[in-house]
Image (tube, rainbow, N blue to C red):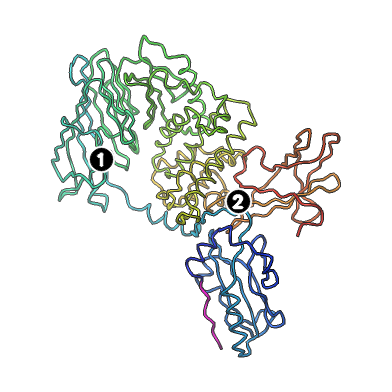
Amino acid sequence: MKFVSVVWIPFVLLLLSCGDRDISAITSDTQNRYQMLHHGPWSVQHDSLDNTVMKSDLTFISTAVASQGGAVDSLNYGSSLPDSLRFNKEWYVGGSAVLVFSVTIPDRGDEQLIRSARAVCEGALIVTPEGLRSVFLSDRTGTDIDTERASTAVEPPPDVTHHLMVYYQHDSTASSLEIIDSLVVDFSESNADSMAFSFIHRDTSSVISSTAGIFRRDSTQNQYLCFADSSGVYTGVFRNQFQINIPYLDSRGRVSVQSRLTSAYLSGDGYCPISAAPARYVVRMFLPDSISSWTPLEKGETQDEWYSGPGGIVGGLPIAIGNYTESTLFPRYRMLIFAGSPISSLDSIAVEKIASVLRSTLDFPSVEFSFVEVINPSGSVVTSAFGGMLFSRGSLESLADVSVWDENLVNGVVPAGSEILIGAAKGILVQSLQLDPVVSDMLAAWIPLRYYTANTDNEPGIAVMRNAYLKYYLFNTENLGGNGNTPVIAEYALGDPMLNDSPLRPFVAGGKGVIIMEYLNSLRMLNRLPYLLQDFTHASSGNFWLKISSSLRVYRGTDKYDLLRALLYQPGIPQIHVKWWEEDEMILIDMNEIQPGLPFNLEFSECQINLTDTTITRTLMPSIEPGLLQCTTDPVGYGHVSTIDLNYTGVIPADIMYTRVFPGELE
């Protein structure tokens, strides 16, 4: 028995095969020398074969099969050439797919024939489908993703408790706000012996006093590490005083602490040490009789005592101090305005609209959310944190009217107020304590589009907005992750933990993720989203997919199960090449997914037909020819068909290319 080694591709060629659009060109003077072999929209160009003794083949296999040597068949009994040798060349094209070109010859000891077969394989060039995205799609499989999630969800974090005392003296002429935090970190139930904290607002008045264990600066700006003592506990006291009318900024340059003679607020970002893990809070406010306070905690036995509920708080504790009047917007949604000073009418409209959209999209049973007015002499401010949004007067007025949002996006202008909506969504989503960061990002980024949809009846404008998110995703992932003049950066699936640290995360979560949310919403698959968010308030079992699918009641064996799994676990989106033509007052449509990897198998139900003088919408039906769709073009007197659009609402997460052909031209 003879064995033939695999023909491996040089690394440079591997990079070129992952979407380089220049390699598909074939000049006219080489047509006779080269042959083309096709597999769907993918092709390989190779030297001409002696068809009497050589047989070529082109197929896709998975990376798992390729890694096991499944592409190598040195002694081939099953081909059209019995007792033969097969030589292969492989291209790892992304999406866990490997394109394999094979040349099979009779096994008769002909060394010249063997050299010829090897030379054909070595010289073969991949020809990618026209219009293929240049970004390389990750090869990680669903099994890889689930295995990694399960392995990282086992270790419990240390137990963190803040005993916070807040002193506010409105008759002080220097510093009216003082915070004393007695921090306890218990490592007894964790294998860790240190924990990272961010602590931003440190100045000459700050005091750190460790009573058990060590608290020291890390190499990262504003980050510190605490270490347990011999008993497995760290304790320390942190004290900060904030001067009157001086804005204290967070790590992103936004005002997060402001102290005044009549009011004060803290957004939760860095005025005391903050860990990434949930923390319990016990808070005591020391306030003058005429001043009230707000914080997203449960009230204790006295008016100025507060306690965190089950699970704790993530991301720091926001606090607002002033003479407040409280009103209820909806159950568990409140608004606090300074007494004797009515809110701006436009702010009031915006608050009600924001609350309504949050309730209809992200609300879940344990959510509490408050809109709290603050005073900031340095200018308007909006800052969101756990369980609430702090805003100064006039800062929400841009959200009262969304009529020009679609026009703004067409002109490349981000709609005013969209970041406010994303922040408000984060203030709710952070209460789903164990929610995956990427899922949180895509849900938050979805809210401006939901806000626009809820406050307009402009259907074309909604389609423009959806397409803007899709283009945001496509352009930026190709620009940053493509293989032209930049390094290849793999695009990971939404459900893949590797996306957390990828530079493509903002565009995959904030672009692709938004369109996927729109698509799932159009299929009525998000009716149980509140149950999903509530389920993630508890510690994860490690089975990310099981928690998502069971919360949404999407069960194995159904089309919706396979669809949701593909959208969350496969990188990229469907790239669909549509060929269409007219025949007997019908439009016939041939659709093929050209992206590497498994198909998404999205369903298309309607087609918009653009004629010279009008536009009509028709329902798609299966054609009598297998694999084709069709729809009628019965209106007469409105001119000729110019174009068609299978995604005129922009709701389908797909990149579609159209080619008009004529009967008989379809291969």
Q: Position of residue 438 (x, y in %)?
A: 45, 44
The CA span between labels 2 and 1 is: 42 Å
Q: Position of residue 177 (x, y in %)?
A: 22, 23
Magenta stretch, overall SS: loop
Question: Residue 451 versus residue 377: which sits nearer the camera?
Answer: 377
Q: Position of residue 290 (x, y in %)?
A: 27, 12
Question: Residue 277 versus residue 663: which sits nearer the camera?
Answer: 663
Question: In percent of the image, x 85 and y 44: which residue is there?
Answer: 585
For numbered disc 1, what is the local secondary structure?
A: loop
> As drawn, is 453 to the left or to the right of 370?
right
Q: On residue 635, which mark appears?
A: none
The residue carrying pointer 1 sits among few (fewer than 14), some (14 to 19) or many (20 or more) residues within 10 Å by Cα, namely some
Say above or below: 452 vs 554: above
User: In the rendered structure, which disc, 2 or 1, sits on the residue that comes first in sequence?
Assistant: 1
> As drawn, is 317 to the left or to the right of 421?
left
| Residue indicated by mark 2 | 574
Look at the image and give the residue range highlighted in magenta: 1-8
Say above or below: 152 vs 520: below
Q: On residue 222, which mark appears?
A: 1
Q: Amino acid at mark 2?
A: Pro
Residue 336 located within the stretch drawn in magenta: no
In the rendered image, the quadrant that contains the C terminus is bottom right
Question: In percent of the image, x 30 and y 17: which residue is there?
Answer: 322
> As drawn, is 86 to the left or to the right of 238?
right
Say above or below: 252 vs 81: above
For numbered disc 2, what is the local secondary structure?
A: loop
Question: Residue 577 versus residue 618: which sits nearer the camera?
Answer: 577
Say above or below: 139 vs 308: below
In the rendered image, the quadrant that contains the N terminus is bottom right
Q: Residue furthest front?
A: 29
Q: Position of residue 165 (x, y in %)?
A: 21, 28
Question: In percent of the image, x 40 and y 25: which residue is there?
Answer: 370
